Amino acid sequence: MGLPWVATLLCVCCVRDAAPLLFPRDSATREVKELNGLWSFRADFSPGRNAGFQQAWFSGPLRESGPVIDMPVPASYNDITQDARLRDFVGWVWYEKEVWIAVRWLRDGNTRIMLRVGSAHYYSVVWVNGEKVGQHEGGHLPFEADIGAVARKRNGTSCRITIAVNNTLDFHTLPPGRVEYLNHPKRYPSGYFVQSTHFDFFNYAGIHRSVLLYTTPKVYIDDITVVTNFSDSTGLLSYQVSVVGSTRPSVRVSLVDQDEKCVASSAGSSGLLKIVNINLWWPYLMHEKPGYLYTLEVQVTAEAGNSFLEDMYSLPVGVRTVQVTSTQFLINNKPFYFHGVNKHEDSDIRGKGLDWPLIVKDFNLLKWLGANSFRTSHYPYAEEVLQMCDRHGIVVIGESPGVGIKDVQSFENASLAHHLVVMEELVRRDKNHPSVVMWSVANEPAAEMPPAGPYIKTLVAHTKLLDWTRPVTFITNSNFAMDHGVPYVDVVCLNSYFSWYQDQGHLEVISLQLNEQFEDWHGKYQKPIIQSEYGADAVPGLHNDPPLMFTEEYQKAMLESYHSTFDQKRKKYLVGELVWNFADFMTGQSIMRVAGNKKGIFTRQRQPKAGAYVIRERYWRIANETGVMPAWSRYPCQ
Ligand code: GCB
């Protein structure tokens, strides 16, 4: 049986808008207006989930289509109400907000008015005053539309913004999923369907990041690309500025240090800046001043008709290099060891909604742990998080939403084509973050299936074309003899759960099996290895001595068993360990999970479990051993 709302989805897929490039910032020539807060909301509970399109809910105020409720933005909608139908809803939901646009924006024909959504999961269609202005496929990445022409039709009145969001996943979405109709008349009501996925985190949906209006002049800085290097104490920063709206813009750039001193400048849309006595960007715990950022101030002027237009944008930049050898991961030519975590964007009530208190709390916990890195498992995180990483020197492996690619259909061309576009959007968004040192194109695809080989090969090659400065990987949990993807990566990233998913309860097998794992993979590929996941569920407050599965003691003992083997391999080719997971997180309901995944070393409310103390001791010890750690940060003086 066909899915009516997927049909609607397909027809809006035909056109796609360009994804935005630069993070919206105020400047002397740009203004930003946040549209966060309460929006009107209505889920389309009609059997085919397509009443909203059939009845054109976008054409008038949403409240006139039927009952609406308040919905906070940004937030997932799932946990906001007491309605069980909305918690596990699959299909279209409708958001609407009435906003004022300043007349000075409307009257100035040389001003572009952009509507930008930081992320909405999964498929979005946007209207302004009933006119469609854009659509986007994929959660976790921003999209925008130029709404100037539509907004100007109603000069001086408020604007109605309507956003329809659909969380339906199929074989070709990223992540993939599947909607199944259960047609047994004695067991299920007619038309009954469920959505299933091959990943365990809850498929939270809604508008997850900020919605903004921002302006630029008609001639504007569209993109900036920065690549950095250094030689002795001289930093080298090559830049490229792309300008839209003028064929002969005049471009000036200057690099300003943290004392607000201009340390280099140049003219032209591309060039090389030399910085004497460079302050390199260093990871947390590797230098006295981690996360040193300069500001690249870009100024563009151009004649457009009778006007003289000017645009300005300030981009924070860090100067650092990344390289990989057969046994090492080098940052600024020094061996870097990832002692870090895997995270999720997840919290109670808000789901995947951007939440500043949570972000800042997590950074404080990362520092408390002595963690120097994390992987954005299993999708791109908010840009605001990466900006924090840049400033605090937290190193990031940036992962695409390519998680749960397990069915053979999800390796078909339709999936690959979309996956390539997502990598383009991701690299374009995050390429200038010094904290991002490697791309992960996928987590645990079925890499033993033959079609995985060409699929991963193409993805890795495409990502390297987009960005030749960073290594590329994907995360594997397949057998080393059968894996078709690892030949193409720069760093081998392995997930394993010895004594958990196999040999349950048998901690004594870990060291043997882990040693085998490392020797097999390094023997075959001669590439550095990161243990990208390992861990055990621990229900907070559940204790037993000797350790039993699900107790805090078991989590502690399992981590410690892994660590003794890590310590041996660290001297050879192991370049990192990322515990699964930083904090407990919500999952789909199943007998495998007790109200979510409990492999966090912190609870979902960010209270430490036994595992957190093990990790803390260890990470500070590793940081101390590197010998480059500043005195101020020596454990336990934090
Ligand atoms: C994995 C997945 C991760 C799961 C984890 C687990 O291998 O990459 O998404 O949450 O295992 O706890 O099962």
Image (cartoon, helix red, strand yellow):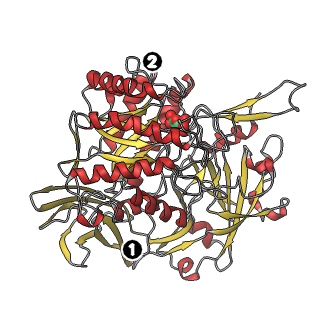
**In screen coordinates, is 627 left or right of 388?**
left
Q: Nearer the viewer, residue 174 or 125?
A: 174
- Say if residue 403 shows up in the picture: no
- Point 50% across, 48% down: residue: 610
Look at the numbered disc 1 and give the secondary structure of its residue.
loop
Q: Residue at x 67, y 60 (%)?
A: 131
Could you tell whether 565 is left or right of 158 in the image?
left
Instruction: Write down the quadrant of residue 514 in the picture.
Output: top left
Label 1 near label 2: C-beta < 8 Å? no
- Circle 1 residues within 10 Å: few <14, some 14–19, many ≥20: few
Q: Amino acid at mark 2?
A: Pro
**Residue that lies at the very extreme toward the left in this rendered image:** 232
Percent coordinates x, y for residue 312 in the rendering: 35, 73
Q: Can you say whether 130 is above or below 609 in the image?
A: below
What secondary structure is found at the residue carrying circle 2?
Answer: loop
Cα separation, mark 2 vs mark 1, equals 57 Å
444, above or below 201, in the image:
above
* Residue 46 appearing in the image: yes
Q: Nearer the viewer, mark 2 or mark 1?
A: 2
Is the residue marked 1 within 8 Å of ligand 1, measured from its CB? no
Residue 247's spot in the image, x, y percent? 32, 63
**Quadrant into which the C terminus falls:** bottom left
Pointer 2: what residue? 450
* Residue at 75 percent of width and 37 percent of height: 4
Read off the residue under disc 1.
305
- State the image quarter where residue 390 is shown: bottom left
Q: Residue 618 in the image: state x and y as whole percent.
A: 35, 48
Confirm or reject: label 2 Cβ below 8 Å from ligand 1.
no
Answer with left or right where residue 478 lies relative to residue 171: left
Q: Amino acid at mark 1?
A: Gly
Which numbered tag is attached to residue 220?
none
